[in-house]
Image (cartoon, helix red, strand yellow):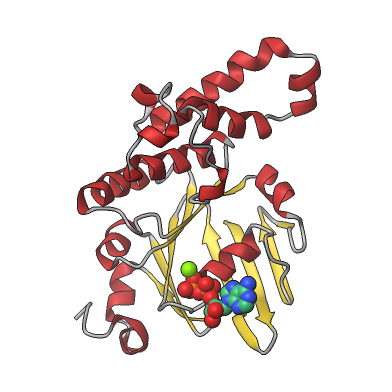
Amino acid sequence: MAILETQNLRKSFGALTAVDGVSLRVEAGTLHSIIGPNGAGKTTLFNLLTGTYRPSAGRILFDGRDLTGTPAHRVAHLGLARSFQRTNVFPAFSLLDNVWVAAFACAPSWKGLLWRRADRYPEVRARALAALADVGLAGKAGQPVREISHGEQRQLELAIALAAAPRVLLLDEPAAGLSPEETKRLVALVRALKGRYTIVLIEHKMDIIMSVSDRISVMHFGSLIAEGTPAEIQRNREVRRAYLGGVAA
Ligand SMILES: Nc1ncnc2c1ncn2[C@@H]1O[C@H](COP(=O)(O)OP(=O)(O)O)[C@@H](O)[C@H]1O
Ligand SMILES: [Mg+2]
């Protein structure tokens, strides 16, 4: 069953149509990648899915429910989380504090937590620590964020997304700017999260895409031009012409 689906989704910025009639089905429990050249509309598609942008046309269904036009904070509460938004990290605070805030904000009844149920704070803390452990950062929980490496910051951003107990995780170029060693660690992490979450991944590095994806959708000038398994995508002539060039040959 598709947990996330778009129907003829479109987003225009003035004369430019960045997302042009995208119909995508992401099956629950899969890792579904979106590839395509720079400017293809991948990030805009994520911005539509998270409610950051309102679509110009089309629909978004999440778990069978129409999300079209739902504001970003509501979408996050429904279980669609996006990682790698730097703005959510406070450098002077500890890793745990940063994740705690995310876990707290997404607690089922934050009003209850805030005003009456101080006894549930340990639950939030436990969830935050579990998210840090999931990304391999439990040992650094008490350290200020500004002291950790660039690669670890990415892991932290992932923990922040996980603390919200999402059902679908959207990852936009998680390996961008990482060293080969850091990239390896991040890929291992994504692989470990696979199956526990439905993951939609935007990534440029083809070796990563081909090794972790269950399905791949290819975007070109705002439209999806192909969808299939990694092997099918590597064989697809149109994809190779539009995007892969000789790389996959
Ligand atoms: N907020 C915006 N205003 C105007 N144009 C935008 C905006 N966001 C993206 N675009 C344009 O939409 C197109 C798709 O961009 P983007 O979704 O970032 O592509 P990708 O992530 O695939 O590289 C680009 O031409 C980009 O310049
Ligand atoms: Mg992008």
Q: Quadrant of residue 192?
A: top left
Count numbered badges in the picture: 0
Where residue 222 appears, as percent x and y from the top left, is 54, 81
Q: Residue most toward the top? A: 119
* Picture layout, residue 86 above or below residue 10: above
Image: 45 above or below 157: below
**Residue 4 x, y percent position in the rendering:** 60, 58
* Image side of residue 180 versus residue 118, left or right: left
* Nearer to the camera, 158 or 25: 158
Residue 135 at least partly seen: no
Identify which residue, 235 or 178, lies in the foreground.
178
Side (left or right) of 125 relative to 77 = left
- Displayed quadrant of residue 209: bottom left
Q: Quadrant of the N terminus?
A: bottom right
Q: Position of residue 215 (x, y in %)?
A: 40, 64
Residue drawn where x is 67% and y is 29% of the image: 107
Q: Is residue 227 above or below residue 168?
A: below
x and y percent of residue 5 in the render? 62, 64
Q: Name the residue located 27 percent from the left edge and 59 percent from the top edge.
A: 211
Q: Nearer the viewer, residue 98 or 68?
A: 98
Residue 186 visible here: yes
Q: Residue at x 34, y 56 (%)?
A: 175
Q: Is residue 184 rendered to the left or right of residue 171?
A: left
Q: Quadrant of the C terminus?
A: bottom left
Q: Residue at 57% of width from left, 44% of height from top?
A: 88
